[in-house]
Amino acid sequence: MKVLFTFYVPSGGVETLNKLRCESLQREGIECHVLYLMPGSSQQNQSKFPVFIASGDEEIRALLFTEHYDAIIVTSDYLLLERLRRLGYGGILIYESQGLGKREDAKNMIIEAVPYLRSYCNAVLIPPTDHLVEYFISICPWLHRYIIPNIVDVQTFRFVPGETPHDPVIAWVGRLESNKNWREYLQIAKDIRSSKPNLHLWMFHDPQLASEEQKQLFNEELYRLGLNDRLVVFTNIPNHVMPVYYSSIAASGGFLLSTSITEGFGYAVAEAVCCTCPVLSTDSDGVRSFIVHNYSGKFYPLGNVGIAVQEGLELMNNLELRDNIRSQGRNHMEVRFGSERYAHSFREMLNSFSIF
């Protein structure tokens, strides 16, 4: 049994997902390869499975002809469905919905994808994210759906003892684009700093994925709010090193702040919870899989900076609640997101197509 996963570029949550599931599936006897259409910053991450970077028709055709995949999972890029069929692939083709952005953007993309899903696709694979499930039921009622929770590496992502920062840190992970809502991060941090003057800000992002306009707007807002002396930016940190940073944030007395408008899953938030790093997040849908308010993390209403500041300060000042959230969050992740569960569900999906 041989499977190919495809995506645009090796970066972000999808690259993390591909790494984790390929390693898990290969332990269960499913050979996995990954194809990215463009090079990206996460190429530096080590892989225990073949990873191809190719965009030309002849390169992709040669790969299909040589490897004879039983199934191909195409993530987000619905145009690739038609292309793979045109290049001669006749096997099982599954569209995977991940990282489609804001709810309205996701809905519009699924509507645009309908002719391709109807003509070239055997099924859709989605995480248990409410708005994605709802859209595929209403827009594509004929298309068979497989709903499998994403996998999280609860073994690698755990608390790592180390040197504790002198001052509390509020961290943010994402791309400088509107759905990740970086403006709200800066505004919340500014207001919390009124109560915590020694506060520091850490931002983890990939500048290659940000437009020049967004970079300029970010810098202007940073200086306007007077936070330029508080900020440290980390770029292109390998995923397997992130537990060190999440653990430092936890030890500092700070937290990870997620300001996203919509998340299909939210890998950075899930991985922080695994490392016992407290999280404060918008209710961006996908993160409901692992955040239970005041149990495994905290929610605040999108756009309500005042409530976010209150919740953030409680997360920093109420040490009993903070400690409970840290330990309960870790336990919650261990119970819900083991790799064996994903591999079992994925194999059942393939078996339903008589792939054994």
Image (spheres, helix red, strand yellow):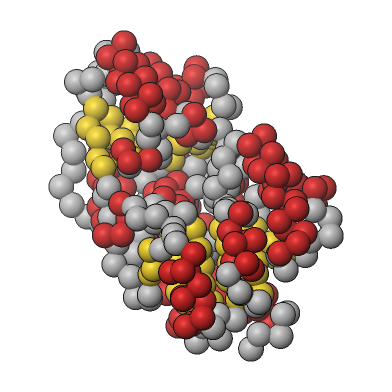
Quarter in which the N terminus is drawn: bottom right
Residue 333, position in %: x, y? 49, 59
Seen in the picture, residue 147 relative to 111 is either above or below; the reply is below
One can see residue 189 in this view: no
Seen in the picture, residue 66 relative to 254 is either above or below; the reply is below
Residue 17, position in %: x, y? 47, 61
| Residue nearest the observer in this picture, 204 or 68 | 68
Residue at 50% x, 72% y: name it.
61
Would residue 45 appear left or right of 16 to someone viewing this image? left
Residue at 46% x, 75% y: name it.
63
Would residue 87 appear left or right of 200 to someone viewing this image? right
| Residue nearest the observer in this picture, 248 or 55 | 55
Q: Quadrant of residue 144?
A: bottom right
Residue 176, position in %: x, y? 40, 32
Seen in the picture, residue 270 relative to 54 is either above or below; the reply is above
Residue at 50% x, 47% y: name it.
266
Q: Residue furthest front?
A: 58
What is the number of callouts on the image?
0
Residue 171, position in %: x, y? 33, 36
| Residue nearest the observer in this picture, 2 or 298 | 2
Residue at 58% x, 45% y: name it.
100
Quarter in which the C terminus is drawn: bottom right
Seen in the picture, residue 29 relative to 216 is either above or below; the reply is below
One can see residue 50 in this view: yes
